[in-house]
Image (cartoon, rainbow, N blue to C red):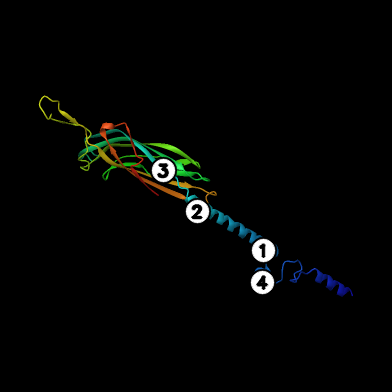
Amino acid sequence: MKEAAIEEEGLLGMDDDGDEFGYGGGGGGWSGIPRRVRYGILFVGAFFGLFFFFALILWGASRNQRPVVTLQSATFHRFVVQAGTDASLVPTEMASLNATVRLTFRNTGTFFGVHVSAEPVTLYYTQLQLASGNIKYFYQARKSQRSLTVSVVGDKVPLYGGGSSLSSTPTTQPPAKKKMPPTVVPPPAVPMELTVRLRSRAFVLGRLVKPKFHSEVHCKVTMDQTKLGKPVSLKKACTYSH
């Protein structure tokens, strides 16, 4: 009778799978892992799955919230063309230019700020770079904007014949009729291309989601040497690409 009672108590301590502690049978594979461990693995897997799914949603949403760059105006302060020599003492015409470019940068992101850097802002005459200027690195908070002023300068840039038509001095023509003063012709206008390139990066969920944005702007602007010091609007003179 004692042996029967002991055997019955042992059977009561077993679960349906025959495990004394209720952790499953002695089979291998998934069923051989204790139940509590299985629950823990499932919980961790579900957590990481939801986390990466949420990160993917944030990445997709952030890609549609690009920063907006708008060129406002360019002001030419000084332009001089004169004879000179380059670093190798080769005689050539030299051009000096001083201008100011104004633009706005707007971060449209609703839940992230952006870190912004830029390539040099350049002014070209045909294929010849006449001046350049730098935009310092900055951070732009979410749903905010700032105005930027860039000084674009070129000092004694060798032209090597590429700017043979450039002049910064007015010319005097003889009068059309006698007893009339000579006619002073201002120097010709100079067509230029202004280029601005910005790179923006956001950090969402720490550094897990890092969307990048590239903004490139090309503007056709004409420098009228009779209007130095007056802003030239760029609102309808630029093409934007991303």
Foreground residue among 142 and 41: 142
Percent of width and height locating residue 94: 24, 37
Q: What amino acid does circle 3 point to?
A: Val
Quarter occupied by the N terminus: bottom right
Nearer to us of marks 2 and 4 is: 2
Q: What separation in Å lies between label 3 and label 1 (alpha carbons)?
A: 52 Å
Camera-nearest label, 2 or 1: 2
Residue at numbered disc 2: 60
State how far apart marks 2 and 3 are (Cα). Answer: 21 Å
Toward the left, the furthest residue is 178
Real-space Cα separation, disc 4 to disc 1, in angstroms? 14 Å
114 and 153: which one is in front? Answer: 114
3D distance between C-alphas at marks 2 and 4: 42 Å
- Cβ–Cβ below 8 Å for labels 2 and 3? no
> Which mark sits nearer the N-terminus, 3 or 1?
1
Residue picked out by circle 3: 69
